[in-house]
Image: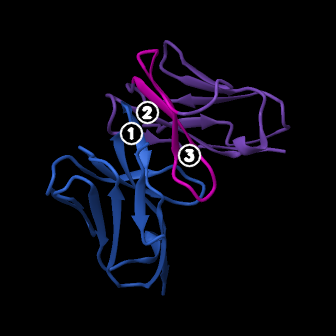
Amino acid sequence: GQQLNQSPQSMFIQEGEDVSMNCTSSSIFNTWLWYKQDPGEGPVLLIALYKAGELTSNGRLTAQFGITRKDSFLNISASIPSDVGIYFCAGPGGGTASKLTFGTGTRLQVTL
Amino acid sequence: DAGVTQSPTHLIKTRGQQVTLRCSPISGHKSVSWYQQVLGQGPQFIFQYYEKEERGRGNFPDRFSARQFPNYSSELNVNALLLGDSALYLCASSATVPYGYTFGSGTRLTVV
């Protein structure tokens, strides 16, 4: 089945630093979604990408849809303590358009 | 406006028992999906319902079943519980299929 691999698996950064993470797939996706999950909560949609090469921002977050349609990238600029959490990429597919396949997640911890 | 509401928030069951989890979607949302998130992993798709019809099913055994009611709320049932069913069960709703999902905070199920 489809697999989404995220890297890095976890990262410790200092407040104010920029963060980059990526997501790669074994197959083509037509949509990429980036979610953030805080402890004890459900995932919250951050950015949605619908076209290869697309670059979309949401405040300090910027995500890109890779031109091969097999990868996507998320950047966070000037990180703050509330950026702590797990970031997941996700895409629809896997035999049914109603299904979201989630990545393995990147755990972000921000130190003061 | 209320978000996606799930009940109960926490649940402890014994192996072999049956459990019913409930979800109320955002008002006006006709699509409801269920996901299982085991600790340390991304959510895994279980079911998706739209307009009370099953539109997608993930790779889960027949012990898992769901239904959607005329008011678009949904129930997830799991029979003959196993230790491995311990997880956070997430419900997500959307106005359309398949994108734009909003997740609830989940039900934490522990099987002992």
Which part of the image, by quadrant, shows the C terminus of chain B?
A: top right
Q: Residue at x 35, y 61 (%)?
A: A23
In the picture, one chain is blue; tell me its letter: A
Who comes first in sequence, dot 2 or dot 3?
2
- Quick one: label 1, few (<14), some, or many (20+) residues within 10 Å? many
Residue corresponding to mark 2: B93
**Marks 2 and 1, how far apart at CA:** 5 Å
Magenta residues, dominant SS class: strand
Residue A100 is covered by the magenta coloring: no
Instruction: State the image coordinates of residue B72 (x, y, percent, origin top left).
Output: 48, 20
The residue type indicated by label 3 comes to Ser
Which numbered disc, 3 or 1, marks the residue closer to the eye? 1
Instruction: State the image coordinates of residue A105 (x, y, percent, origin top left).
Output: 47, 61
In the picture, one chain is purple; tell me its letter: B
Q: Residue at x 40, y 77 (%)?
A: A80
Same-subunit check for callouts 3 and 1: yes
The residues colored magenta run B30-58
**Numbered mark located on residue B101 in the image:** 1
Residue B49 is covered by the magenta coloring: yes
Kind of element beneath mark 1 = loop
**Marks 3 and 1, how far apart at CA:** 13 Å
Residue A25 position (above or below residue B71): below
Q: Nearer the viewer, residue B106 or B4?
A: B106
Which part of the image, by quadrant, shows the N terminus of chain B?
A: top left
Same-subunit check for callouts 2 and 1: yes
Residue B26 as seen in the image, left or right of residue A91: right
The residue type indicated by label 2 comes to Ser
Residue corresponding to mark 3: B105
Residue B82 as seen in the image, left or right of residue A4: right
Q: Residue at x 48, y 87 (%)?
A: A112
Q: Are marks 2 and 3 in contact (CB under 8 Å)?
A: no
Q: Are marks 2 and 1 in contact (CB under 8 Å)?
A: yes
